[in-house]
Image (cartoon, helix red, strand yellow):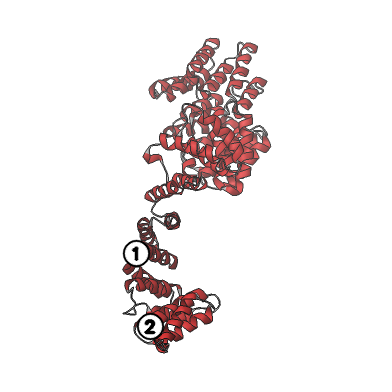
Amino acid sequence: MKHSIDTLKKTWFLSTKTLLFIFITSFAFGQVPPPEVKQARTALEADQPKKAIETLKKATATYPTDATIWYQLGLAQMAAGQRKEAEISFQTGIEKNDKEPLNYVGKGHLRITDNQVAEARKLFDQVLATTKSKNAPALNAIARALLTDPKFAAEALGHLQKSKALDKSNPETALLLGDAYLAQNNGGQAVSSYENAASLDPKWGTPHYKIGLVYIRSKNNSAAEEAFLKATQVDANYTLAYKELGELYYQMGTGKAEAAVTNYAKYLALTENPEPGQLRYAFFLFMAKKYNEANEIFKKLVAKPEVTVLTLRYYAYSLYQAGKYDECKTIFDQYFAKAKPEEIEAGDYIYYGELLVKLKQDSLAIDAYRNAVKLDKTLVKIQEQVAEMLYASKRRYPETIDAYQTLISMRQNQKATSKDLFSLGRSYYFDKQFEKADTTFGKLIELQPNMTVGDLWQGRARANLDPESTAGLAKPNYEKVIEKANPEKGKADLVEAHSYMGYYYYVVGNLDASLAAWKKVLEIEAGNVKATEAIKAINNIKNPPPPKKANNK
């Protein structure tokens, strides 16, 4: 089940939004940027782009001649997907101060993301020429734009190395260097650069968050956890760190389910747009066995016209776990009606089968389990359940036989267990296929030679193949039952075995042996009617009463 959910996991590496949201920082403001810029960066790091944009718009009114704020606003608008608005902001910045290079870079950034690389390069070359490649914020901005496409990572790295030479204390440069190295799959250098950025700005959570992403990429969960936790320690409102912690703990499994729920709940409480994360949160609640809470979310999601089959699936699962069987049946019906055949998984049919058992609809449950096995031939336990349910119905023996034959074929090395042979043999027996029952119980005897059950049932099968007992087909089996049965626990079996022997010896004319057998029955079960009558009949044969005298009156 878990493989369906994992398909929803979003990757944050090198996406345009990820690279943009963290870079609203102090360039072209002298030593101290306006406080609104830091507020906007904090808002973006809290996954609140609308708030960041509002803050920067107010800043443009407070600092009307500061063209760099328009660049910051354009980046924030790009991060929020407002590309047309970003174009306007960059252009406005140029009109406010055509000597400020950042807004030209901003326009080039947009061209890069539109795949208009030639147009972007013209703007970048213009900026490099006018600044003589001596403006660190401009070099960083160009690198940032180039890093939206990994194939430009080497070029971006060159600009960042020049920027670092101009100002080694800029944490923004160190962070971008980490992104450039990561784009080249150099995780070690990336982490070193992010660590440098963190040391240059100890109150900035983003370097730690980025380090966590690198370790996620290399599947070093413990190091990733440490980094994300550090990001939240540095900045208690670092929204995306909580999101990644939730995802990380979810991937770790049920042992971390509570931690996944706790961290993802913090993310949803901080983010500006919690709606897209609701489905993930419902999954986390499901894993944490908080089914009622999960169902409250699923219920809202399935009411939407664009509800996905995945949502319907896990809502049905969660309702089942919560014991809401009637509601679960309704949602499962919606799921199977909406899902394409290739979307339905074996686990869906297993859950559905379990539901139908709860609803006492065993015949439909059997069909559901069969569908599961059709999709996954490794489901031996489910096939075993199908066979057992069919046998328990006591009327569908041909289907039961097929089910056990299928089960045996699915087992490792196609070797039947004692239980398989016992149930299959009895199914043949009750279906009156006595020869096949005889053969099957013979295999059971080979597998369990010290048990009486094989001999007992093979004896019964053979007795039906020799209904008059003239051939004594069952005699060897019942002799073994007499030899091996426990006198206390196997009394019924012993009564049956001695009764057969009594009847067999009577048929073949050995009255003494027959009499001895029937007496043995009475020793085991005093008052046995059949034995009492048989003994009386044999004694009458051996000692017939004198003929009655004729009445001559």
Specify the amino acid type for callout 2.
Answer: Tyr
Of 434 and 50, nearer the camera is: 434
Quadrant (top left/top right/bottom left/bottom right) for the C terminus: bottom left
Residue 88 can be seen, yes or no: yes
Residue under circle 2? 506
Name the residue: 40% across, 61% down: 411
> Camera-side residue: 281 or 552?
552
Where is residue 136, by image quadrant? top right
Provide the residue designation for mark 1: 432
Q: Say which element carries label 2.
A: helix
Count numbered badges in the picture: 2
Marks 1 & 2, CB-CB < 8 Å contact: no
Q: Label 1's element? A: loop
Name above or below for residue 31 compared with residue 475.
Answer: above
Residue 28 location in percent, x, y? 59, 21
Please, what is the three-letter code of the amino acid marked with disc 1?
Lys
**Residue 320, x across and y down, in percent:** 54, 43
Location of residue 511 with respect to 257 vertically, above or below: below
Looking at the picture, how far across and down is residue 242, in whole percent?
61, 36
Mark carried by residue 276: none
Pinpoint residue 81: horizontal percent, then vertical percent. 50, 22
Does any portion of residue 212 appear in the rendered image? no
- Please tell me how crowded label 2 is: few (under 14), some (14-19), or many (20+) other residues with Cα within 10 Å: many
Between the residue at mark 1 and the residue at mark 2, the CA separation in whole angstroms equals 26 Å
In primary-sequence order, the first of circles 1 and 2 is: 1
The residue at 47%/16% (across/down) is 84
